[in-house]
Structures are given as C-alpha cells and as structure tokens.
Amino acid sequence: MDPSGELALAAEFPTPDREQWLELVQGVLRKSGADFGSLITTTYDGIEVQPLYTADDQVPDAGFPGLAPFTRGGRPQGAVEGWDVRQQHRVADREAVMADLENGVTSLWLKGLDPAAYDDVLADVYLDLAPIVVDGGEGFLDAGRAMLRVWDQRPVLPSEVRGNLGADPLGVRARTGQPADFAALTDLLGKARAFPELRVVVVDGLPFHEAGGSDAQELGASLAAGVAYLRHLTGTGLSVAEAVRLLEFRYAASADQFLTIAKFRAARRLWARVTEVAGAPSAQLQHAVTSPAMMTRRDPWVNMLRTTLACFGAGLGGADAVTVLPFDAAIGLSDDFSRRIARNTQSLLLEESRLAGVIDPAGGSWYVERLTDDLAHAAWAWFQEIEAAGGLPAAFDLVADRMAVTWENRRKRLADRSDAITGVSEFPNLAEQPVTRRSAPAEPGGGLPRVRYAEAYEALRDAAEATPERPKVFLATLGPVAAHTARASFAANLFQAGGIETPNAGPTRTVEDVVERFRESGARIACLCGSETSYAELAAPVAEALRAAGAERVLLAGKKSTASDSGAQIDEYVFMGCSALDVLEHTFEALAVPTSSGVQR
C-alpha cells in the first residue's frame, strides 16, 4: 500500500528474484550459442564485472562524505561548489595563461617550464586567488625555489598562498631511472615552511599508468610512494598530521567512467586506512588528469569524447582538481582552440550538466560500491606486496616487471581489438586531414616505459602513408551485396586500421567477375568475403583464379573452418578476435612496406 492507502502498482506483480532473471537470460543466450560467462568482463586486475548487481552485492558501509574512510568524498559538502579546474601549461605563454584564468580555469599546472620564466608568465595572475602547481621533474628543487621567490616577492599574504611545489623524487625515479633525491625534498621543505597552506609533494600515479599498468597497480604503487614520503617527512621532525597535509595525489582518469569513479573513491579509502594506522586519519587531496595513454594522434577529435568521459568519471568520483588534456596533446603543443575546448569541457559538466550539484552521486549504486570495494582490495594487496619487497624505491624492479606483464596483456587485447580504439583500430578514416602542431618539449626517459594504446596502429598508418602509393588489399566479395556485406565491412575496417586501402569487387556472380575487378584494382593481395554457402562453393576456385591473376597472398574473412572443406588455399584468416596487428604486419611484410621498429609490442 502507498501512504494514501491505495494499492501500489508494483503490488500487482510478483517480486522477481535473481534466479528467475538468470533463467530468462540463459534462455536468450542459448538461442545465440553463448553462455552466461560471455556477459562477464574481467578487468586487468582480475576483477569480474557482472552484468547485474543487486542488494545482495552490498559492501561494508562507506560512511558519510567528509568522514573516514572518506570513500564518499573528502569534504562534507562534496563537490557542490565544483572542483578545481586545473589547466596544464608546458610553455611560457602569459597570454594563454590569462585566457584560461579569465574563462573558467581556477588553477594552473606549470609542467616543464624554465623556472626563470615563472615571474614573467605569472606577472598578471592574482596569486592569492589562483593556486599554482609547478612540475619541474628532476629539477623540482630549482622549480620549487623559483616559485617560492615569486610568492615571496608578490603582495600576497603567506596564508593566502595555495598550490604545490611539485616535489616527487620517487616519480622522477619512475620516469628517469635516476636515484630518488630525498635530500632535495628536505631542502625544499625547509624553505616552504613560511606558507602554511602550501603543499610540497605530489604523489604522481601517472608514471605507473603510462607504463601500461592497471588501476589497482597505479593505486597500490602510489600508496607505497605516499607511505615512503610519510616516513621521510616524519623523519625530518614533522608530525604525521603535518606530513600528510603536505601531500597531493595525482591519478589518471580514463574513458571507462565506472572504473574511474571507483578508482578515486577507492584511493581515498586506501589512504584513509594508511593515515588511520599512522595515527592521523585524513582525506586524500586528489588531482585527476585525463589519461595520456588513451590519447590518439589519429582522428584526435575523438579525444574530446574520451576526455569528457574521463572528466565525468573523475568528477563523480570526487576528485578535488581535474585537468582535461587538450585533444591534440599527443600530437604536440596545444593551440588556443584545443585549450579552449579542454576548459569548456569542464565548464559544461559543472555549469550546464550540474555534475557537482549532488554529493557523491554514485554512492549507493550496488555496481559502483562493489567495484570500489573490489578495486580497493586489489590495490591494497599490491601495496602490501611492494611493502614486503622493501617499499619504494627498493621495489622498483618488481613494479617495473609487474607493469610489463600488464602492458603485454593489454597489448594483446589492443591487437585483437578486444580493447577498441575508436577512430584508430575501429572505424578509421583514411581520408582524414592530419592535425599538425608545434613539437612539445621532450619527455624524460630512462625509467618506466611511456606508452599510448594507439601507437602500434598509428605506426602502421604512418608507414602506409609514407609509401609512394598507399598499400591495397582487394576485397573479393562473393555473390550479392546481402551475402558479403557483413564480412566485407569487417575486413575493410580491419585493413583500414593499418592505413590500407580496400577496393571492393561489389556484387559478383562468377569467378570471372571477381578476377576482372581484382586486375582493375591494382592490388597484390586479396581477401575473400562472402557467406558460408558461397565459401563452400566458390572459395577454392576464386582463390586459385586470383593467384593465377597475380595475387601474392589470399586471405579469407572468417575462421578456418568456414573454408577448410572447400579445399581453398588460404594464407591467413581474418575474423572477430584474431590479432588485427598481426594480420596488418604480415600484409605489410608481404608488400615490403617498411614499418617503424620503435613500436612497443
């Protein structure tokens, strides 16, 4: 009954249970030859994501926003006032800095700039209003000193200074392989004491993410780094509470919105546990950066969608500051337009979508709460493994080895397109006009590898476009359009992901039709595309006729069983789940097209 005493509509229906739902689902799956396991996806951390979550999947109470364990947010009011919109700047451009601050950006991230340029580039900035985060890499001591001088010389009260000096010796170790310089951190710490609200250390998870690591690996490694910094800072005489206040954590936000939401919630819960054990339970200050690894050089416009999803996930996950990388970040230095789109992405989510209008909007979702709990447990186990190996930096070899294993698993899924990259490995546009930008400053190397998920496909596209004539694979379509469209479209999509042109025979009736159009195409490789019926009848004679007409390789769109009884001589099979990168590389080898040897595979 509802409060008015009337019979509720739902009361007319029996309450379904999970078993009834499962029986209905399995009935549908049986018709397609699939099983229930096909609906379960497994993350790189081994977490099984189920197709349905119910109240039975509830986890321990996540508490309240602003209270330990801070899963639901570090502040009682959540993000109802919005998060810090933080724009990255990699060159000293005073006009670009002011354009950002005048159009929605609330803090600045100066990455890799010459410290001597800080005073000039920030000349027009109200430093009591805009927090500044500097990122000097291995030169973090000089960068921090220079920024302190700027604050000291400006008419701003020490208590009004906000931001971070960006000291991260362990991050430098991860990026460059050089020993972590904790002495420089101690030096910088002493000089920053005059600014009570200023943070000094960034615990950067991006090196682990950009090495191909998983979400739990990024969380666990950053947690170990945070603990190493606490040990060092308290060793200088600071209390745990004082040391914790100096730290800020930086994490990658990916286009997987639910994993991103769960990652930021789990990170706060993990750090709350560490600080609780240390005697000063604290909320983690979080800076989200849209994943550099997911960015593409090809069809870069799609990056706008990726970064929007990533920003959405970070915002819902409760990040305190968010940096949306411009869509052209993987190409070079971003221009005014791309920076404008990056900041407007955040403005739209905050002002138009009202994303920050609800405290912990994902809280109470059985799926998100379970994913948060599973991710937290996986990250904690990895953290404990690092600590058992001596903690960071002693365990860097272990960390590098584990990241390499995860990257290899990820590479295989990228190769067979289980992890699709829209505009690159799926739905490529061979006619796209390249986007050109000025070269960006070189990133440091020597430590953990820095990968992008699209790089192998993009290297093939580059190789294809460097040839005098674009490589071709002729699609030998068998029968009417309805008989071959599905497999021809699949094959075209795959070959074009490598920059290969795919002239199509169209509707055909005879072997001679196919051969004639093959000769007209000028291709040296052909791929048969048809139905099971047409393969049984025509695969063998068409393959033989194509070879006689000059085809150096003949492929077939489908699995081997589809043509094995026909006696056709097929060099390679192209099907859903095959390694697209292997097929493309074999095709390039057959056509003697040189490819980049620098692709990490």
Image: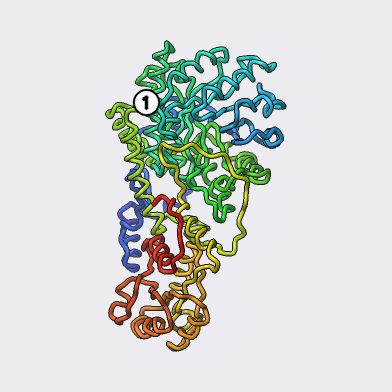
Q: What is the crowding at mark 1: few (fewer than 14 residues within 10 Å), some, or many (at least 20)?
A: many
Residue name at image x 66 percent, y 43 percent: 340
State the residue position of label 1.
273
Find residue 439 and report its image quarter. top right
Foreground: 496 or 214? 496
Foreground: 188 or 29? 188
Looking at the image, can residue 162 be seen? yes
Find residue 147 and report its image quarter. top right
Instruction: Please determine whether, in this image, residue 245 is positioned above or below residue 583.
Output: above
Q: How is the image coloured?
A: rainbow
Foreground: 552 or 36? 552
Q: Is residue 194 shown left or right of residue 412?
A: right
At label 1, which amino acid type do we have?
Answer: Arg
Taking the view exactly as shown, the residue that stands out farthest to the top is 237
Could you tell me which secondary element the residue under label 1 belongs to? helix
Instruction: Please determine whether, in this image, residue 263 is positioned above or below residue 515.
Output: above
Tell me where residue 575 appears, x and y as whole percent.
38, 67
Residue name at image x 60 percent, y 56 percent: 434
